[in-house]
Every structure is written in structure tokens, then in C-alpha cells.
Image (cartoon, rainbow, N blue to C red):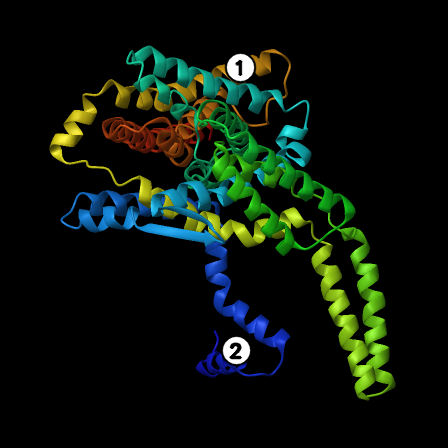
Amino acid sequence: MASKYDFFEDFFDLISFRGQAKRKATLKRFTQPAQNFINTEISSGIIIIIAVLMALVIANSPLDNLYYDFVHLKIKLAIGDNVLSGDLHYWINDAAMVIFFFLVGTEIKREVLVGELADKKSLPVPLLGALGGMIVPVLIFLLILDDPAARSGWGIPMATDIAIALGAMALLGKRVPSGLKVILLAVAIVDDIGSILVIALFYTDTISLAYLVAVGCMLTLIAFSNYVGIRSIFLYSIMGLIAWICASQSGIHPTILGVILGFMTPWKSWYPTKAFPEIANKLLLRIKKSLTDSEEDIHVEKAEQDLLAMSDIAIESVSPLHRIEVILLPWSALLIVPIFAFVNAGIDVGEGALSEALSSSLTYAIAGGLLLGKPIGITIGVWLAVKSGAKFPRGVNYTNIFGMGMIAGIGFTVALFITELAYVDELFLRDAKMGILIASFLAAIFGYLMLRISSKLAE
């Protein structure tokens, strides 16, 4: 056990100037527990749930005016003579969520190149499972609902919330086969691709050709810069920001741009990772020689230059995609998505509003699509894939698949996002969000229980 002296010595090291390397190592001892929490699959889901509960409590309390004032707080961004203006709700949904969808794009790229979607033998299972999990919920939604205006939200029950779904699965630990978690992730990725296409094709406003061409030009410039070897992430960020401004004026939803930029992010590092140890050893020998030969300033400076070179090579031996993910993922998972949930989940669930929502066919259409359509559709899709000769993961059975499909019915983040695009009417928005909340809550409970029971039976 560490003594009091050890603690104070570490703290002194942290605030003193005994050396950058030692300060970083000491800092890690203080921050590692928090970092471990950030790195767990379940953490983002927990924070999202807390944000939703906070929004519901505040929006249904005497402080409800403060909540709505916060959500509709006006924010302006002026660049020269151009002014972008909107409330906090707009900036979260149309700007900050671009980062979330950017990371969706990088995850899609990873799965396509080296993940479950790269294996031709395994691909049909998540592909057909996801297609079934999108088609059947839409069919159930349309069967329950006959109001043409309300039917415009048919894309809502297609969605799966990756963070909360993986968090619910993580609660089961080793009780479920590892292959089932892989299928859930792959199904959710294909699901995201489907949802993105639906947003792009069916929930897009009138297109401005001039701004759309400007977006295309910026994307071409980004691709060309990458091709000729420009490495500055700052420069790419500026070009991405300009592309976002153009996209926000073009009529297409800016989050689509986020997915495209994520998919365009280079997968390969500038330096081959395998070559780094050899390069580092050569530089270390040069540094050692410089410092051994003489302590003159010129030799120390040469050693420092070699150290900087080694630092740059170490960074550029990691792919830009992975480096950007490491930077953005905590911000997206632990800040942006929870704030998105907070500003979108504050609905009136008072006795009158709740009874009205529970008597609305829209609420039941969305809840039915997510709660029944997802597990039925995914199970049918996986069954068809296996019947066509696809490889079934070891240790996974159809009871597991149905339970996983139930958990995939947690449609929260993207479902709320599509709701905001599909409806303007306040009653439709309320009923749709109520359906999403009810379905997601029940899907998490039933899915967890089904997988827990099936794992006990397997023992």
C-alpha cells in the first residue's frame, strides 16, 4: 500500500519541474481510473441515460422554463458578412452531432476494411440481420399507422443506439458469447449506414446546387490534399469547417458530411508502424552518441532535434483515423451525445400528456417497430443468411440472436435525431419521443433478461 509520503511526493512531482516524462507518468497515476472509465463500453450509455432522466425530471418540474430557455438559447456565429444563427438545439443537432457521425464514418470504414464486414463468409449474417432489422420495423410502423402526416416518420424505428446497446450487452460480461457482441456491433454499423442513407435521401430539404457544388469542391480538395501527402490535421479541420458551413446552406443535412469525412480519413499511417522500432533505435543511438561525445550546447541541441524527430515519427506511425478517434471519441461519447440526449429528451410526461401520448397510434407504431420489429427482423435476416451458407459464430444460437435483436431495439440517439427531421408538429414530436423512450426502456430490460436466462440455460 502506498504511504502518505508517496502520495505527496507524487503530487510534488506533478507540479514541479523534475522532467516532462516523470510528470506525465505521475499524472497518469492520478488520471488512470478516470481514463479506464472513459474506455469502457458502458460509460457512454450510462451518461446518456442520466442525461435523459435529468431532461425528463427538469422538463416536468417547476424549473421547466429554465430547461426550455436553455434549449432555445440563441447563439450566433459570424464569419465576415456571413452570420449563422440558431438556438442551442440547432447547434447541437446540426453542428456538434457532425462529430458523432464523423466517428460513425470512421467505424464504418474500420468494419469494411478489417472488421466483420470485411469477411465475405461472415458478412451475410450482420448484413441480412441488419436489413431485416430495418425492413420489419418499418413495415410494423406503417401497418399500425394510417395517418399520412404521421407516416413521414417511418425511418424512426430503423435506428439502433450503438452506445446504449453495447452498454447493455457489456452488463452481461462473459455470460454471452463474444461472437454475439461482434454481430451486434456489425449489425449496428450496417444499421447506421441504412439510417444515414434514409436521412440523405428522404429527410433532406430543398437542395441549393451552388452550395452543394461548394461542398463537392471542398471534399475534392481534402481528397487531393491527402493524396499529395499533406499531413496537417489542423488544415483538414479548417477545410472540414468550410465544408460544413456550405453543407448547412445546401439543403443536405450536415451530419451526412460528417459520415463522408469520417470515411475519407486515411486508414494507413504515414510511416509503416513495423518500421518504427528500427527508426527509433537509430535515433536513440544518435542521441546517446551526441550526449556522450560532449555536453556542449550544440550536441545537446542535436540530441533534442533527434528527440523531436522521434516524437514526430512515433505520432505519424499511427494512422490519422486512429489518432483522430482517440481525440474525438471521449468528447463525442461523454459530452456531445449526452448533451444531444438532454436537449432532445425533455418532453412533457405529466398525467394529461402521458395519457394522450399513450392513446396515440404514433407512439405504438414506433414502440412496436423497435420492440417487436427489431428482434423479429434481425432473427429472420440471420436465419436467411445461415440458410444461404453463411458462417454462424461459434457458441451463438437463435435465442441469443433474438435477445440481441431486442437490445438492438434501443433506438435512442439516431431515432431521436430522425424524429427531429421528420416532424415539425409538437404533438407528433411528443408522441414519437414517448414511443422511443418506452421502446428503448423495455427493449433494454427484456433483451437483458432474455440473454441472461439463455446463458443460464446454456450452463
Q: How many marks?
A: 2
At 59% from the left and 15% from the top, the residue drawn is 386
Instruction: Provide the secondary structure element on which disc 1 rests.
Output: helix
Instruction: Provide the secondary structure element on which disc 2 rests.
Output: helix
Sequence order check: which comes first, mark 1 or mark 2?
2
Q: What residue is disc 2 on?
A: 14
Check if mark 1's residue and mark 2's residue have beta carbons within 8 Å: no
Q: What residue is disc 1 on?
A: 383
The image quarter containing residue 138 is top left
At 59% from the left and 52% from the top, the residue drawn is 238
Whether residue 178 is visible, yes or no, is no
Whether residue 101 is visible, yes or no, is yes
Q: Position of residue 260 (x, y in %)?
A: 59, 36
Q: Is residue 346 above or below residue 279?
A: above
Of discs 1 and 2, which sits in the foreground? Answer: 2
Q: Is residue 118 above or below residue 294?
A: above
Q: Position of residue 427 (x, y in %)?
A: 23, 28
Q: In terms of depth relative to the viewer, which is nearer, 13 or 131?
A: 131
